[in-house]
Each structure stands twice: as C-alpha cells, then as structure tokens.
C-alpha cells in the first residue's frame, strides 16, 4: 500500500505518470519513521529533519507540508489497510518532479523495537571510504556505498560491516549507529566523522545524557583499533532496535550492560 502525494494506491501504476517518471531519476531522499505499538515515534524530530533535507537539496517546500498534514498522510496508509499494522517502518520518499515536490509513503510490517543478543559478527569495510563532512550526515549521500558494502558483508559471511571515513576513523555500521561501552564510558562517532545524523541516534544520546548519570557519554573520532579494546559494542536502529555485537575479528563481547541499558530506554519510549 502506497500513499502517493495524498493518493493511496495499492500499485504504483495507479499513481500520477509524472511521479513515476521522476522515480527513475533517483533525485530524491528517504526518511524512515517508526510505528511502535501503534505510536509514531519522534515525529516532530523526523519532520524537522525532512524539512532540513528539503532545503539542502533545494526542493521547493509546498505550503501544505505542515507537520500535522504529513502526519495525517502517514496515518492514512495504515488506516486503509484492513488488518491494522501496529508495528512497522514508514518509508517516506520525497521526489523533485519538475518544479514541484512529491512524496511516496509506504509501510513495512515489523516487530516492536526489541533487543537482539544473537550471534552477530562484524568486520571492517575498507574498500570505499566515507567523506568526513556534514554532507555525509545526510542518509542519501552514501546510499550506493552501503549497497556495495552490504554485498561485501554477504559474500564474506558477515552480519554487518563497520564503515570508515577518509581519515580511517569509524563512522557507523550498515545497520545503524555504533556505540562502544567500556567501564563507565559510552562512546560513539561524532557527526564530523561522517555518520548519519539519524533521529534515533539523537533521541538515544539525549536520553543517555539526561537519565544515565552513571555513564560518561562521549561523541568523538574513534580509531578502529579501539573496537577490540571495548567491553561491549552495540548498534541501534529504528528497524532493529538494539543489536549487540558478539564478534569482531578475533574479539568476543559481553552484552549485559547494553541489554539492561536499552531495556530502560524501551521503558522510556512507552
């Protein structure tokens, strides 16, 4: 089911011809929004990220693109489905169609945000590097690199790979924002490292700083060698929640602290 600029259709062939034509030009960007237990999470932050991206891409922002209007378009997709989805991921694609800005919204059914502690093996991906600038903070910028590195991970029997920037520093993984936990410190790459400025990352960091005084939260450049020295490493994402890393190269990791920490965060979301 798709919401194409306000028209809900079951197949894209029913959408406006101009909209379909511009889909093939690939001049668009996507914002993923989480539906969790019937609640759209962090919508205000997602909305402002959408507007900021529209401005940076020089898209014309229609006067109708208010926070309330776009939220209605999200809800429209789930309301029209017979079996109501209560947990899913909205994919909001914004397209520049000549002088106008159009959107396509779809939703994928998912489990609620959860904690994953199953075996999860990662390694570095060094073939292509991310530029360490604020352009890389936008999800669209390195989308092709992520597709190539995902194939690399599959070919090498990995669950995920750690991406590096042009300074050979850690940025993120394919599947989310990476955090290193050691003693009472939680570290994550800063935005200057080139990681995506994701809403879920922002919300989780705000929560860590405000409600977890036992941990010193640090955003900074991280050398890949520090991964092997960490007590625990975990990844967060809207799609998968918390994913604890079990193996990196020859190192194995615990997940006790990560598990309890994210358990508290899930309670905060309710």
Image (cartoon, rainbow, N blue to C red):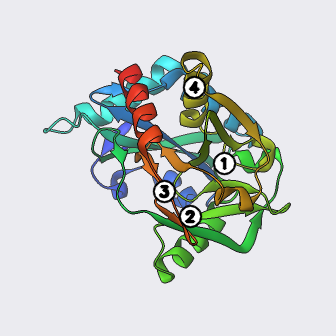
State the image coordinates of residue 96 (x, y, percent, origin top left).
Answer: 64, 47
Badge 1 crowding class, 10 Å Cα cut-off, few under 14, some 14 to 19, many 20 or more, is few
Q: Is residue 164 placed above or below 176 in the rendered structure? A: below
| Cβ–Cβ under 8 Å for marks 3 and 4 | no
Q: Report the Cα–Cα distance between label 2 and label 1.
A: 13 Å
Residue name at image x 64 percent, y 61 percent: 228
Say what secondary structure mark 2 lies in. loop
Say what secondary structure mark 1 lies in. loop
> Mark 2 or mark 3: which comes first in sequence?
2
- Determine whether, in the image, residue 42 is placed left or right of residue 270: right
The residue tagged 1 is 98
Badge 2 crowding class, 10 Å Cα cut-off, few under 14, some 14 to 19, many 20 or more, is few
Q: Quadrant of the C terminus?
A: top left
| Cβ–Cβ under 8 Å for marks 1 and 4 | no
Q: Report the Cα–Cα distance between label 3 and label 4.
A: 19 Å
The residue tagged 3 is 245
State the image coordinates of residue 146 (x, y, percent, origin top left).
Answer: 60, 65
> Mark 3 or mark 4: which comes first in sequence?
4
State the image coordinates of residue 126 (x, y, percent, origin top left).
Answer: 72, 73
The residue tagged 2 is 24
The residue tagged 4 is 208
User: Which of pointers 1 and 4 indicates the residue nearer the eye?
Assistant: 4
State the image coordinates of residue 196 (x, y, percent, origin top left).
Answer: 66, 46
Using the image as rendered, state which of residue 215 and residue 91 is in the foreground. Answer: 215
């Amino acid at each position: 089911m798709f919401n194409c600029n306000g028209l809900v259709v079951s197949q894209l062939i029913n959408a406006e011809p101009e909209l379909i034509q511009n889909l093939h030009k690939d001049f668009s960007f996507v914002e993923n929004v989480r539906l969790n237990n019937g609640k759209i999470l962090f919508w205000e932050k997602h909305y402002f990220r959408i507007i900021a991206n529209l401005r940076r891409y020089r898209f014309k922002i229609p006067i109708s693109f208010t926070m309330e209007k776009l939220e209605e378009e999200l809800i429209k997709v789930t309301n029209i489905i017979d079996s109501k989805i209560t947990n899913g991921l909205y994919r909001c694609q914004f397209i520049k169609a000549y002088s106008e800005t159009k959107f396509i919204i779809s939703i994928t059914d998912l489990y609620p945000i959860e904690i994953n502690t199953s075996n999860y093996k990662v390694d570095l991906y060094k073939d292509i590097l991310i530029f360490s600038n604020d352009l890389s903070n936008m999800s669209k910028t390195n989308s092709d690199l992520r597709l190539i590195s995902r194939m690399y991970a599959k070919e090498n029997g990995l669950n995920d790979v750690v991406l590096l920037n042009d300074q050979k520093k850690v940025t993120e993984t394919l599947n989310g924002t990476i955090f290193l936990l050691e003693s009472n410190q939680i570290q994550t790459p800063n935005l200057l490292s080139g990681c995506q400025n994701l809403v879920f990352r922002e919300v989780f960091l705000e929560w860590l700083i405000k409600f977890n005084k036992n941990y010193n939260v640090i955003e900074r450049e991280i050398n890949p060698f520090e991964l092997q020295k960490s007590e625990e490493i975990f990844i967060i994402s809207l799609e998968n929640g918390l994913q604890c890393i079990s193996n990196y190269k020859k190192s194995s990791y615990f997940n006790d602290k990560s598990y309890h920490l994210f358990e508290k965060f899930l309670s905060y979301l309710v």
